[in-house]
């Protein structure tokens, strides 16, 4: 998909993505006036929102620096109809002209494409034989939590200690017991609806009432348990099923990725960031594209950040006693790489040499199966409530007690769910077809989300040739799936099909997508991994860089391994834990 830039002024990078040649470098520095804070937090999404909330609530003065813009008034589109849009939501090809990568993602549509980066202005590159789809790059306060899928799962002790279990990768430098109180805290605040199942592979949490399952889903759940001892549960989702903290319960309108006027799903903009602002201790600096961490003359302590104002294109600085990067895994690594100095030519906080390495994503919908339940009675309608949630099939391969696979290490979970649709494939035409169209097709689909092992050969670096529209060097992303991931795909399909078969499903359709492009999971993790050994890791267990004690990176770049669960609940729990440590260190006078 991607190739090396050519020698033209605008180098063609991938599918029409263009980036300026490097000669268009960032402009000279114009210092801002009153710009000194206790802590500078970069990024206002899942992790940055929590860091800002906890710090400001403790009385700390924070600059929350965000590359995106603030929300406009009533900027939600979940109830807007396609015919209210200029192109009736049929403008995918038009959108692809400026957002060829962002429109790879189902969540970027004519309703909300303006929330996402213009890929031509803010490109990245890859080697020609290693395509990577970097999607979900929003430029709006709240970050990706504006559009995320809200699935919220804890990682288990086995996930955090994978190396001890099977020898691959590295263990996390903290245990499940270290994280559990912070998982509790996040869940109680954001509101996660779900069902406790008592399975060690997917620890239970502080759940709001679960959403209901369809009849087909229940049939599959019962059969999977009876025939294989596998647990299928309703999705654990950061959507309110009862009112919480002034937010209303969900009314099942469906398209959450377009925003939610009732704030029923967790979006940092209206929760953590709003709380931080309410303290009076938070200064929100929007449209600020941070590209460097500033250091003192000894190169020992961070002193602030440097950014390009997206509107005026001026370069500005903000000073702080502590800097916390929460810009999303790839963006934070980019800032550290761009902060290289003569003393640290490989990037800031990179004495280990592993900065950028061990990039991961989840092997997303690469295998699975769907099937139909003709004997389940239901009716296809256009106006039924739309449950914004699906099923979750808990990992059952290579577990502490479960069956081991001879083909691969680690495992996968299933997401998916049931639906009742019109029978558009009905034979015939005219009145007969219209009548058969109404025969409901009751189906359930399971799609695998697999763990990707951390490989040093999957890495991020700066592209020496290409800068974005602001003159900031862009990332060159190197990522492919390894043999272990590829070996999971047939099992995803076979295991889903055998569960559907046990449930009495008909027309079972297993599928495999061996050429699934990395990035489609939109769960980028790694690049600045945590660890106990400063020679082999960038961060300690509090996401504090080993090299620069007042520099933290609190997003998923610190994950040493990724489990198969969606990462954001863990990102938030970790950010709170690390912020608590930061506050303690400030109190002790160490920062
Ligand atoms: C469509 C979609 C579905 C998803 N579904 C799920 C799901 O179901 N469950 C799950 O767990 N996860 C899901 N995710 C992933 C989830 O959204 C992320 O894991 C999470 O938001 C990451 O949090 P973060 O704080 O690291 O980054 P973000 O929430 O993205 O916040 C980072 C912020 O930093 C800003 N920023 C970036 N660069 C700079 C810079 N240089 N200077 C200043 N600011 C900067 C960005 O504009 C952004 O606002 C989904 C993501 C997408 C896009
Ligand atoms: S389905 Fe629920 S959470 Fe989603 S937009 Fe509608 S009300 Fe909000």
Image (cartoon, grey):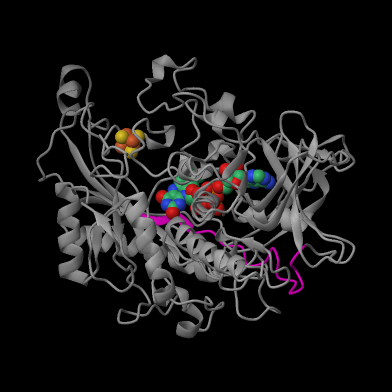
Residues 380 and 275: in front is: 275
Q: Position of residue 307 (x, y in %)?
A: 75, 43
Q: Main secondary structure of the magenta part?
A: loop
> Is residue 567 among the parts visible in the rendering?
no
Residue drawn 47% across the image and 78% down it: 162
Residue drawn 14% across the image and 48% down it: 215
Query: Which residues fall within the magenta stretch?
Result: 348-368
Q: Quadrant of residue 205?
A: bottom left
Q: Position of residue 528 (x, y in %)?
A: 65, 65
Residue drawn 29% across the image and 48% down it: 390
Asked if residue 20 is positioned above or below residue 199 in the image, the reply reads above
Q: Is residue 360 left or right of residue 8?
A: left
> Is residue 173 among the parts visible in the rendering?
yes
Residues 50 and 522: in front is: 50
Asked if residue 66 is positioned above or below residue 166 in the image, the reply reads above
Q: Position of residue 207 (x, y in %)?
A: 26, 57
Quadrant assignment for ligand 2:
top left
Q: Quadrant of the C terminus?
A: bottom right
Q: Is residue 124 left or right of residue 234?
A: right
Q: Position of residue 62 (x, y in %)?
A: 61, 49
Residues 126 and 407: in front is: 126
Asked if residue 303 is positioned above or below residue 256 in the image, the reply reads below
Residue drawn 23% across the image and 21% down it: 429
Q: Quadrant of residue 10?
A: top right
State yes or no: residue 134 in magenta.
Answer: no
How many callouts does the rendering have? 0
């Amino acid at each position: 998909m991607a190739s090396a830039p050519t020698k033209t002024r605008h180098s063609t990078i991938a599918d029409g993505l263009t980036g300026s040649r490097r000669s268009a470098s960032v402009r000279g520095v114009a210092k801002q006036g009153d710009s000194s804070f206790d802590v500078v937090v970069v990024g206002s999404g899942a992790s940055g929102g929590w860091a800002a909330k906890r710090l400001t609530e403790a009385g700390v003065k924070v600059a929350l620096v965000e590359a995106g813009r603030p929300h406009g008034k009533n900027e939600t589109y979940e109830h807007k109809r396609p015919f209210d849009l200029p192109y009736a939501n049929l403008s995918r090809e038009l959108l692809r002209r400026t957002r060829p990568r962002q429109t790879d993602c189902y969540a970027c549509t004519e309703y909300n494409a303006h929330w996402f980066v213009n890929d031509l202005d803010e490109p990245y590159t890859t080697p020609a034989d290693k395509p990577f789809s970097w999607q979900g790059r929003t430029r709006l306060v709240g970050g990706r939590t504006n559009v995320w899928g809200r699935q919220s799962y804890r990682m288990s002790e086995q996930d955090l200690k994978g190396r001890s279990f099977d020898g691959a990768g590295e263990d996390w430098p903290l245990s499940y017991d270290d994280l559990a109180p912070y998982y509790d805290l996040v869940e109680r605040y954001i509101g996660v609806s779900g069902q406790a199942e008592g399975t060690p592979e997917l620890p239970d949490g502080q759940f709001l009432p679960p959403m209901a399952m369809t009849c087909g889903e229940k049939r599959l759940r019962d059969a999977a348990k009876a025939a294989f001892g596998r647990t299928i549960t309703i999705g654990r989702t950061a959507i309110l099923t009862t009112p919480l903290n002034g937010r209303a319960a969900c009314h099942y309108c469906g398209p959450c990725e377009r925003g939610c006027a009732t704030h029923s799903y967790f979006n940092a903009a209206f929760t953590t960031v709003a709380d931080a602002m309410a303290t009076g201790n938070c200064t929100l600096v929007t449209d600020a594209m941070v590209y460097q961490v500033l250091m003192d003359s000894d190169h020992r302590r961070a002193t602030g950040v440097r950014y390009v104002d997206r509107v005026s294109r001026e370069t500005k600085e903000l000073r702080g006693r502590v800097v916390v990067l929460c810009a999303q895994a790839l963006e934070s690594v980019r800032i550290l790489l761009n902060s290289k100095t003569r003393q640290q030519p490989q990037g800031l906080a990179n004495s280990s040499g592993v900065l950028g390495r061990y990039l991961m994503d989840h092997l997303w919908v690469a295998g699975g199966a769907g099937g139909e339940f003709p004997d389940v009675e239901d009716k296809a309608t256009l106006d039924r409530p739309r449950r914004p949630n699906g099923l979750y099939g808990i990992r059952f391969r290579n577990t502490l007690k479960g069956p081991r696979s001879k083909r691969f290490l680690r495992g996968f979970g299933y997401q998916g769910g049931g639906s009742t649709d019109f029978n558009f494939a009905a034979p015939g035409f005219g009145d007969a077809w219209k009548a058969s169209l109404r025969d409901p097709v009751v189906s359930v689909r399971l799609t695998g989300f697999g763990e990707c092992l951390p490989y040093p050969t999957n890495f991020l670096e700066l592209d020496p040739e290409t800068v974005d529209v602001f003159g900031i060097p862009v990332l060159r992303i190197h990522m492919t799936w390894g043999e272990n991931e590829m070996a999971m795909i047939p099992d995803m399909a076979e295991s889903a099909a055998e569960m559907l078969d046990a449930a009495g499903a008909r027309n079972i359709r297993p599928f495999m997508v061996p050429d699934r492009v990395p990035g489609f999971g939109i769960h980028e993790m790694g690049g600045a991994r945590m660890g106990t050994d400063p020679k082999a890791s960038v961060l300690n267990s509090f996401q504090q860089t080993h090299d620069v004690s007042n520099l933290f990176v609190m997003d998923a770049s610190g994950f040493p391994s990724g489990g198969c669960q969606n990462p954001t609940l863990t990102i938030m729990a970790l950010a709170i834990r690390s912020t608590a440590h930061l506050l303690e260190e400030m109190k002790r006078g160490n920062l």
